[in-house]
Image: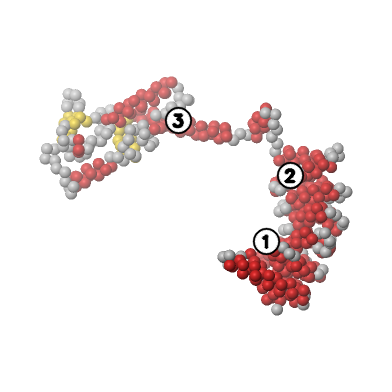
């Protein structure tokens, strides 16, 4: 019998061309030469012939002599005849064979019958086996190459995309390139006011991203915005403040550069002088972005009289829409300081930095306790909620002022009655823990602490 390799497949007893792991033996590659393809075809034909001969023999078809193919699996206990002249093999069951379910041999036979669908054996010539495995390796390499080509096809370099867009008379630009053009247009003396405002409006869209805001600083655009706060044109001040606030938001590097460039002083001047509501609204937004999570800026804000500027803003006629925004800013600064002191982050130095921000004493001294509590008379529920939160967080510092304030006690009493009715309506509608019940809880908590 010729030497051969024995290959075992795990799977259903199906034709080899469908068996898992064998399909790789029949490869079709554009890279294969014609001779390799011919050899592969020969292997396929040979394997198909072997497959036809490789069906395992079972006891059910061995009542008479059956011809056996080379390498064909048979169960134990058969009579096997060998023709010495032709080399043919015949097999059949013994004449006294009886199926017994309780014998050891029958159990083995049954196990074999059960497993015949999972183990399928056939022989390959050694050269054919090595060639087939080599072809399998080639196919796997081709699959990896095809995957790489597919990725290259779906994701192309930016230079290639630019070239294709240029062929279509379209221009693909990065954010950095667009921002550079917008900054140039804003800084160009030949640009009209409308063109400059349009450039600022477009620029605001990009600087919301942290990296783009840093690029704005690198391109010199940040200082141009700060200088724009001194413009005599109200629209220029408004949009310069708008873009500045977007760039400053949660961006420490830009915050430091802005305060070094004099942005804080210029924003306070806008808020302290006679400007339109739109201009002051954007300036307050930029100021809030600069102060949040930046204790050094908060120190400078207090030194420059910023708290007094905001106090005057909260009593200015026509600026009512900014009252609650100002109170919200103060609430955020107070909570930020209290949390930093509670965390005791000595390693990062945050606690020490916030300890130098004397915000609470300044709030009490400048009469903010009463200014804030008076805003509880606002008609909007949302505004009342923000004021109640601020009053609650300031109770420890403003308790003396609040305890002797009859106006506050009367306002709390009126609000309690109003929100008791609204909370009851919520309860009837099935909302046990509704919005108005939460407001009522805040009112009762404040009133209880003032007793």
How many labels sit on residues? 3
Q: Which residue is mark 2?
A: 215
Q: Quadrant of residue 174?
A: top right
**What residue would you read off at disc 3?**
138
Q: Which residue is mark 1?
A: 347
Hey, which residue is sitting farthest bottom in the picture?
Answer: 451
Marks 2 and 1, how far apart at CA = 30 Å
Instruction: Confirm or deny contact between disc 2 and disc 3 (CB under 8 A).
Output: no
Badge 2 or badge 3: first in the primary sequence: 3
Q: Quadrant of residue 71?
A: top left
Q: Which mark sits nearer the N-terminus, 1 or 3?
A: 3
Identify which residue, 432 or 143, lies in the foreground.
Answer: 432
Image location of residue 218, percent across then percent down? 76, 44
Could you tell me which residue is drawn at 68 percent across and 76 percent down? 448
Callout in the foreground (2, 3): 2
Is residue 256 visible in the rendered image? The answer is no
Percent position of residue 67, x then y: 20, 29
- Earlier-in-chain disc, 2 versus 1: 2
Q: Residue at x 78, y 70 (%)?
A: 370
Local SS, label 1: loop
Query: Residue 114: image x %, image y %?
Result: 27, 43
Tell me: residue 238, above or below residue 322. Answer: above
Q: Is 157 positioned to the left or the right of 223 in the image?
A: left
Image-quadrant location for residue 59 = top left
- Distance between mark 1 and mark 3 Cα atoms: 58 Å
Mark 1 or mark 3, whichever is nearer to me: 3
Residue at 64% in and 31% down: 160
**Residue 107 placement (x, y as % from top left):** 21, 46
Colouring: secondary structure
């Amino acid at each position: 019998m010729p030497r051969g390799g024995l290959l075992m497949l795990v799977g259903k007893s199906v034709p080899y061309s469908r068996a898992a792991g064998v399909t790789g033996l029949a490869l079709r590659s554009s890279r294969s030469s014609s001779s390799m393809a011919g050899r592969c075809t020969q292997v396929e034909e040979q394997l198909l012939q072997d497959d036809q001969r490789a069906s395992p023999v079972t006891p059910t078809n061995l009542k008479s002599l059956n011809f056996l193919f080379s390498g064909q699996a048979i169960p134990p206990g058969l009579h096997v005849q060998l023709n010495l002249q032709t080399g043919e093999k015949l097999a059949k069951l013994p004449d006294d064979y009886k199926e017994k379910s309780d014998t050891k041999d029958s159990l083995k036979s049954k196990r074999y019958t059960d497993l015949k669908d999972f183990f399928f054996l056939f022989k390959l010539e050694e050269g054919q086996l090595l060639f087939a495995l080599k072809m399998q390796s080639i196919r796997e390499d081709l699959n990896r190459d095809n995957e790489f080509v597919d990725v290259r096809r779906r994701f192309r370099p930016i230079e290639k995309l630019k070239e294709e867009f240029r062929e279509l008379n379209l221009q693909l630009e990065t954010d950095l390139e667009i921002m550079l053009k917008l900054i140039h247009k804003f800084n160009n003396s030949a640009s009209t006011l409308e063109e400059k405002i349009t450039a600022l409006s477009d620029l605001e869209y990009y600087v919301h991203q942290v990296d783009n805001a840093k690029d704005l600083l690198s391109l010199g655009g940040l200082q141009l915005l700060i200088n724009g706060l001194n413009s005599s044109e109200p629209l220029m001040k408004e949009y310069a403040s708008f873009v500045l606030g977007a760039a400053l938001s949660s961006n420490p590097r830009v915050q430091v550069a802005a305060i070094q460039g004099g942005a804080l002083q210029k924003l306070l001047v806008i808020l302290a002088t006679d400007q339109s509501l739109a201009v002051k609204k954007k300036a307050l937004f930029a100021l809030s972005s600069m102060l949040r999570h930046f204790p050094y800026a908060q120190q400078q804000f207090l030194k420059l009289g910023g708290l007094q500027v905001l106090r005057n803003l909260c009593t200015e006629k026509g600026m009512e829409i900014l009252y609650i925004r100002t109170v919200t800013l103060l609430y955020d600064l107070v909570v930020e300081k209290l949390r930093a002191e509670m965390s005791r982050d000595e390693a990062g130095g945050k606690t020490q930095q916030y300890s130098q921000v004397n915000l609470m004493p300044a709030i009490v001294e400048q009469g903010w306790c009463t200014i804030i509590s008076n805003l509880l008379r606002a008609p909007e529920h949302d505004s009342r909620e923000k004021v109640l939160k601020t009053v609650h967080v300031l109770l420890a510092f403003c308790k003396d002022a609040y305890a002797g304030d009859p106006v506050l006690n009367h306002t709390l009493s009126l609000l309690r009655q109003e929100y008791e009715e609204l909370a009851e309506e919520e309860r009837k509608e099935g909302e046990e823990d509704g919005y108005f019940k939460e407001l009522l809880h805040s009112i009762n908590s404040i009133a209880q602490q003032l007793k």
